[in-house]
Image: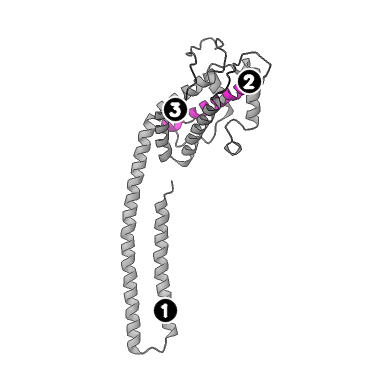
């Protein structure tokens, strides 16, 4: 990860080198212009040149000392960042698991009860859930100290949560029934909502490899199979919901699974 201090060091190097070269150019130019100088003046001239060179050398030594201090401070800051990231990643799997449960609960609220596949024993969905503050605090710590791609992906998860939480406020409930072909506006809105929560579930699940140290970073995007797996984890058989399956296939083909923030 690039650090501003690196740029500052490069600037100081360039400034010192520029000052040194400019001084030499000025003194040499002055020497060629003033060939008529007398012997004493030449001695004075070269004395000034030596003094200038020693002054620049002393400045370079001082600059190197400042560079060493800045390098040490940068190393201390990098060590602190790595320790903070390691501490936050230690609890990140539990945080992601909690986020997955929230997304699954909010997704299942829109489906009629009693249609889980045989063998699924998921607890019934409760009231609509939002992201607790303690989760946001942990994610903030990871976002501050992780690589740029993981920062963006974790931030994107939080954005999706915030958007679908806001959209749920005041929304009239519509229940999605299996084996129903009729598509009304409330049902379409409910399908859009459950697809959104399935996408959030898939995005959150994709971060487990990073949280457990298996992957260096979080994948750039999710796959359509990840979203279908999210429905499977919630006990939703897509083949039983033709409208849902069709809308999901359309959005997959158009590349509209994740929200496009430029269009929001």
Q: Position of residue 211 (x, y in %)?
A: 42, 31
Q: Nearer the viewer, residue 248 or 161?
A: 161
For disc 1, the marked residue is 28
Residue 209 lies within the magenta run: yes
Residue 226 shows in the view: no
Q: Residues within 10 Å of mark 3 (few under 14, many from 20)?
A: many
Residue 211 shows in the view: yes
Magenta residues, start to end: 185-212
Q: Secondary structure at mark 2?
A: helix
Residue 52 horizontal side relative to residue 186, left or right: left
Numbered badge on residue 186: 2
Q: Position of residue 18 (x, y in %)?
A: 42, 67
Numbered badge on residue 96: 3
Q: Residue at x 33, y 66 (%)?
A: 59
Q: Residue at x 34, y 62 (%)?
A: 63
**Proximity of marks 1 and 2: CB atoms separated by less than 8 Å:** no
Residue 263 against residue 20 in the figure, above or below: above
Of marks 2 and 3, which one's residue comes earlier in the chain?
3
**Proximity of marks 2 and 3: CB atoms separated by less than 8 Å:** no
Q: Position of residue 157 (x, y in %)?
A: 50, 32
Mark nearest the camera among 1 and 2 is 2
Q: Nearer the viewer, residue 178 or 232?
A: 178
Q: Residue at x 64, y 22 (%)?
A: 188
Query: Residues under labels 2 and 3: Cα distance?
Result: 30 Å
Of marks 1 and 3, which one's residue comes earlier in the chain?
1
Query: Residues under labels 1 and 3: Cα distance?
Result: 67 Å
Residue 82: image quadrant is top left
Question: If the image is split into quadrants, where does the C terminus sit?
Answer: top right
Number of marks present in the image shown = 3
Mark nearest the camera among 1 and 3 is 3
């Amino acid at each position: 990860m690039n650090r501003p201090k690196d740029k500052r060091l490069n600037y100081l190097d360039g400034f010192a080198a520029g000052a040194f070269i400019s001084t030499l150019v000025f003194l040499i130019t002055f020497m060629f212009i003033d060939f008529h100088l007398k012997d004493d003046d030449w001695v004075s001239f070269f004395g000034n040149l030596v003094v200038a060179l020693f002054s620049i050398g002393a400045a370079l030594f001082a600059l190197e000392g400042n560079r060493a201090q800045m390098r040490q401070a940068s190393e201390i800051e990098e060590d602190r960042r790595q320790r903070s990231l390691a501490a936050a990643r230690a609890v990140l799997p539990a945080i992601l698991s909690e986020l997955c449960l929230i997304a699954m609960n909010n997704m299942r609220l829109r489906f009629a009860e009693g249609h889980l596949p045989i063998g699924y024993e998921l607890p019934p969905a409760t009231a609509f859930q939002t992201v607790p503050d303690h989760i946001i605090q942990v994610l903030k710590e990871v976002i501050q100290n992780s690589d740029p791609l993981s920062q963006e992906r974790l931030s994107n998860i939080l954005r999706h949560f915030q958007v679908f939480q806001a959209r749920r406020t005041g929304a009239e409930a519509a229940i999605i029934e299996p084996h129903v072909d009729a598509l009304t506006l409330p049902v379409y809105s409910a399908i859009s909502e459950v697809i959104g929560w399935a996408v959030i579930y898939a995005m959150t699940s994709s971060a487990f490899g990073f949280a457990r140290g298996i992957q260096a970073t979080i994948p750039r995007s999710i796959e359509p199979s990840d979203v279908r797996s999210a429905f499977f984890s919630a006990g939703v058989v897509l083949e039983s919901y033709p409208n849902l399956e069709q809308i999901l296939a359309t959005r997959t083909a158009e590349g509209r699974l994740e929200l496009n923030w430029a269009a929001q």
